[in-house]
Image: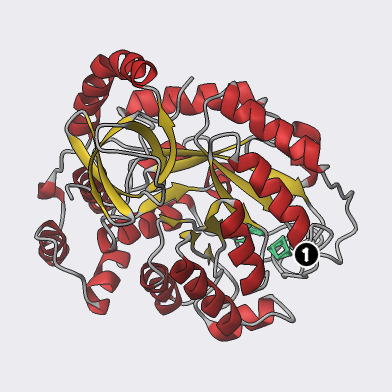
Amino acid sequence: MCYAIPAKLVEIDGRYGIVDYFGERRKILLDEDEVAIGDYLFAQGGVFVKKIPDEEAEEILDTWKDIFFELKKVDQSLSKIDKDKVSENVLAVLQKVNHRKSLKLEELKTLFSMKDPKELSVLYEVANHVRERSHGNACCVHGIIEFSNYCNNNCHYCGIRKDRDIPRFRMSEDEIVAIAKEAVDVHGFKALVLQSGEDFHFDTDALIRIVTRVRALGTLVFVSVGMRSRETYEKLWKAGARGVLMRFESSNEECFNTLRPGTSFRARIALLEELRKMGYVIATGFILGLPGETLDDVINNILLTKQLGPDMYSFGPLIPTKGTPLENEKMPTVEDVLKVTAVARLNDANANILVTTALETMSKEARKEGMMAGANSMMINLTPSGCKAMYSIYDDRAGVEDEVSSAIGEAVDLLTSLGRAPTDIGIARGV
Ligand code: 5AD
Ligand code: SF4
């Protein structure tokens, strides 16, 4: 099984390169001296992962060739728009999107005011169309390994917060590397996220060792280990990490500071900005439906995500979780999340937008609906089921029971039915 399509390097421009696969062109961060024009390579999240011998690449491309164009046809037929169903003011906003003009605050509000199911279906269709226009049928499929549920923090929403009395686990470094090795060698993953609570038992040296070993397996490494120092992240970059998954959780400073006691909104944003400057590929976003949230907050969340220049948006609904201060809060609806997905897509055509597990937890169909409302990425949880059950950031997480191979099978079936190919190659299209 292979989760990326080999691409041919056709141009080199400093640290960047242009790759081509089946006529689609993408810009990638090359960051590598050992490659030359004409080489085949794998890239993920817009970053070079590894070179592939010509023969192997040509063989993989050959198996992909027919299926790629077949999938594209399915995808294109699913992303046609029926404009007759919308009111004039909504149509005016959607036409602006169509002409690739950026939207004003009032226009974003108009989109959020849509309630009629027929109108909403057009909103999702347009978002899906914008997604298709910018990304083709490319879809990133990253694997995630949750290696420790110890956490130093007490975020009000989170089921593994420090004060919650739950069984805790930490994997050994060898265990983490063994799971990553199987993901790369057996399942063909090209990008892995290593996630934990903010667990300082894994100090900088331990993280360096893990990142070095996982990177050596031939995969893009994302870390999701919380607020570490700038120096730590610099060292992790040197060890081979190229991505960071870190949500800013809420663009409302007061809300952030209340719900994450002892941490600061400004420090988090400053760190995200630093990380981007260091060159990291950023995945960031927010929780939807935190207490007291207004429509302005939701829109600011979308705008702040874009402002941080991420490669990938990661946002999901609050799942009120027993034994946390937010256990009695109201959960947003699937429709709320789909609207945010669609508006985020209309506001940022180029970014990858993830369908998160929290959305999948809301309903069986939600992942597909998210993918049809502008999203183009998903993550597959590779944590063994015992640990996955303990990584209980919220109640009844989707997929806790699933074996990895069945989770992969389901994801591939879904992608195939939607005409999407797991091609995650670049940061922008048509460059
Ligand atoms: N509901 C939804 N998302 C949550 N997270 C933590 N707790 C919850 C919850 N109850 C999210 C946070 C964190 C990510 C790892 O999980 O956004 O960044
Ligand atoms: Fe820890 Fe993250 Fe949960 Fe906050 S959200 S308690 S930092 S695991």
**Relative to residue 177, is residue 120 depicted above or below?**
below
Residue bearing mark 1: 324
On whether ligand 1 comes within 8 Å of the CB at mark 1, the answer is yes
Query: Is residue 159 visible to the viewer in this orientation of the structure?
Result: no
Q: Position of residue 352 (x, y in %)?
A: 37, 51
Query: In the image, what residue type sits under mark 1?
Result: Thr
Could one spot residue 332 in this view of the protein?
A: yes
Q: Which coloring applies here? A: secondary structure
Residue that appears at 21% across and 50% down:
130
Q: Quadrant of ligand 1?
A: bottom right
Q: Position of residue 354 (x, y in %)?
A: 45, 49
Q: In this image, 352 relative to 67: left or right?
A: right
Look at the picture and state if 363 lies above or below 5: below
Front position in the image: 289 or 427: 427
Q: Quadrant of residue 317?
A: bottom right
Q: Residues within 10 Å of mark 1 (few under 14, many from 20)?
A: some
Callout count:
1
Report x, y in % for residue 387. Answer: 79, 39
Residue at left 56%, top 24%?
Answer: 187
Q: For this rendering, which residue is in front, 392 or 248?
A: 248
270 sits to left or right of 423 = right
Dot 1 lies on which element? Answer: loop
- Residue 401: image location, x then y, percent: 71, 30
Is 5 displayed left or right of 153 in the figure? Answer: left
Between 65 and 115, which is closer to the camera in this rendering?
65
- Locate residue 123 relative to residue 422 in the image: left or right: left
